[in-house]
Image: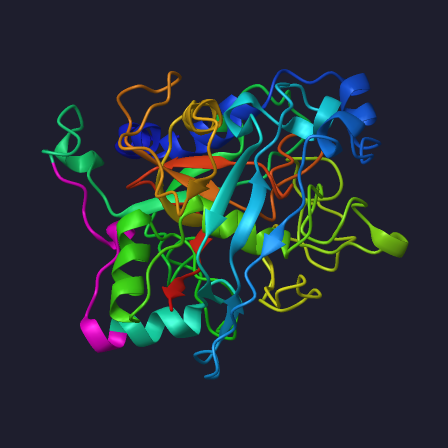
Amino acid sequence: MKNKTFWIFALLTLSIISIAYSYTRFTTKAETTAAAECHEIPSTVESEFKPTVENKFKPAEKAPKGMVWIPGGEFSMGTNVEDESLCSIKGVTKDAAPIHRVYLDGYYMDETEVTNEEFEKFVKATGYVTVAEQKPTKEEFPSASEEDLVTGSVVFTPTPSAVNLNNFLQWWRYEPGADWRHPEGPQSNIIGKEKYPVVHVVYEDAQAYAKWAGKRLPTEAEWEFAARGGKTGNLYAWGNDLKPKGKFQANIYQGHFPIKDGDTGEDGFKGIAPTKQYAPNAYGLYDIAGNVWEWVNDWYSVDYYKSLAESGKVTKNPQGPDAYYDPNDPTEIKRVHRGGSFLCTDQYCTRYMVGTRGKGEIRSAANHVGFRCVKSK
């Protein structure tokens, strides 16, 4: 990598560090092989979930265009498994434990991730410029030289051959000129990709769109309740089998990660996919697992679930912790990601599991992170 962009790359890959480093360990060939076979639901997880009790109220009026009604109610959120390994309990980590009871009022939710087409309407109406399109400043990166301060974002770049999975910098690069209009860099565009989810958006970009649209970003609890579709304790948004009747239900990574042409596309896609390519969940939500990570409104705190569980109460409409806390990166300001992406794989990151969490530095963008919105009744 040229020195010109090294420091910006290092600083703006913090969200990738958050996703990768916290969820994985060094993987041997044997561990990788075993991970591909771990799809059974652990009975210790299943037994700790109490039934979901949906609210009975349903609005008389039709849902806003492109949105579905989520009834809310009381449900079990999180997991009781404290295991950071790749295969045992499918990569669930301590920040998603323990299981705790939450109550939510009903709300509307976008049936898909916000698309390029929808985001473009917002930009044309407002003149909004995303963070990835703004030149970094000396105030934000005081140690960087002026020539290092170039617009751009982080892009997944497959490796020429197999690599150890303990150094994510091998497959991520800071790409000058990469943004939502140019997802792979200045030579790329989104022509013909109007229905693909918008990417290279940071938290404030997603928040700005939501405000313009008369909506808001979901809380983490709202996101998980909706993703579970009224079901209790399932591993995935569609059930407990990764491939019901041998068919993938989400756009994730199959094959040897992260090498060039390593994704076999068994799920129908190599890389990001248009929205609505798989069956929706029980609430009518598409791509609630895989495809792109989704920003939610909560600060990320590693021990937030623990504090809720210890209260011994059903938490009503939780808004997340009052402050961010990640002992791995204590100075970085982070919000929660949910849902996993097209890069999630048994070999590395199984965050397409419905009860799991992600996290990202609030001004770090990448080509596998997007969002969807909600609206209160």
Residue at 67% over, 19% down:
85
The quadrant of the picture occupied by the N terminus is top left
Percent x, y of residue 276: 62, 69
Please identify the quarter of the rendering in which residue 24 is found: top right
Please identify the quarter of the rendering in which residue 11 is found: top left
Residue 118 lies left or right of residue 210; in this view the side is: right
In the image, residue 368 lies in the stretch drawn in magenta: no
Q: Which residues are magenta?
A: 124-137
Visual colour scheme: rainbow
Whether 258 is drawn above or below 192: the answer is: above
Closest to the observer: 307 or 262?
307
Number of numbered labels in the structure image:
0
Residue at 25% over, 48% down:
151
In the image, residue 132 lies in the stretch drawn in magenta: yes
Note whether residue 291 is visible: no
Whether 374 is drawn above or below 358: the answer is: below
Note whether residue 274 is visible: yes
Percent x, y of residue 297: 35, 47
The quadrant of the picture occupied by the C terminus is bottom left
Residue at 42% over, 24% down:
307
Residue that protrudes farthest toward the bottom in the picture: 61
